[in-house]
Amino acid sequence: MPEPSLDDLAAYVRGRPPRLGAVRLVAVDGPSGAGKTRFADRLAAALGDAPVVHTDDLLSGWDDQFTFWARLEKHVLTPLRNGETATYRRYDWDHHDFAGPQLTVAPLPVVLLEGVSAARREIRPELTLAVFVDAPGELRWERAISRDGDDSLAYRKYLERWRAAEDRHFAVDETAAHADLIVDGAAPSALSIKGWRS
């Protein structure tokens, strides 16, 4: 079977039944710096500018890497599941508080959830599509440093701890093994897909 294009993926998602109430929830998961946000944005565009919820916006700092899920459930998943508009405030990483702008997500036919642990075990039964984006560790490290513009020793220690926790989470959760789609995030522009279960 030939590898699907973004348009193929969009058609596949639209053709699947919704599982989160009336919403087709697409999770884009993978380690930091793999290219999740870029892939999610491209797929959202192919889906007619579907909204993208970024889990980083709901984390209460570095130590909330996986424990944020109750906040996501309360402010995003439960309202969407009930056919209601989700409303939440973005975490302000500079001020260490949820002081960012208020964001809203309508219960549209397709919503994307992007970020580390977005396709975790708890949400799998309600996902229409689970995507796992990966890239070589050195490239992911370079991207994270470049993206956040911080090469300080303190940031590097945070990032090392974050990546070690990611590795443990993905091993226990078996996220990649349960993904419908494995994407090569190292590909510069083309959609490079390592695995696809239709």
Image (cartoon, grey):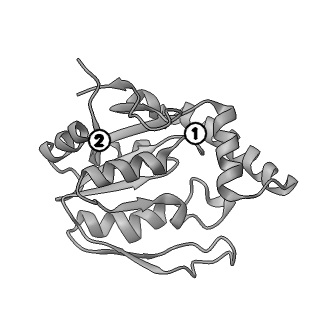
Q: What is the x, y in percent for residue 181?
A: 35, 32
Residue 166 in the image: above or below residue 80: above
Label 2 vs label 1, nearer the camera: 2
- Figure quadrant of residue 130: top left
Q: Nearer the viewer, residue 147 or 93?
A: 147
Q: Nearer the viewer, residue 96 or 1?
A: 1
Residue found 65% across the figure and 36% down from its top: 139
Kindly identify which residue carries mark 2: 129
Query: Where does the C terminus fall, quadrant-wise?
Result: top left
Which residue in the rendered view is the most extreme toward the top? 1
Identify the element where label 2 is drawn.
strand
Query: Where does the N terminus fall, quadrant-wise?
Result: top left
Instruction: Return the mark for residue 57.
Output: none
- Relative to residue 2, is residue 182 drawn left or right? right
Decide: few, some or many residues near mark 2? Use Cα within 10 Å; few <14, some 14-19, many ≥20.
many
Kindly identify which residue carries mark 1: 169
**Total number of numbered labels?**
2
Q: Between disc 2 and disc 1, whose residue precedes? A: 2
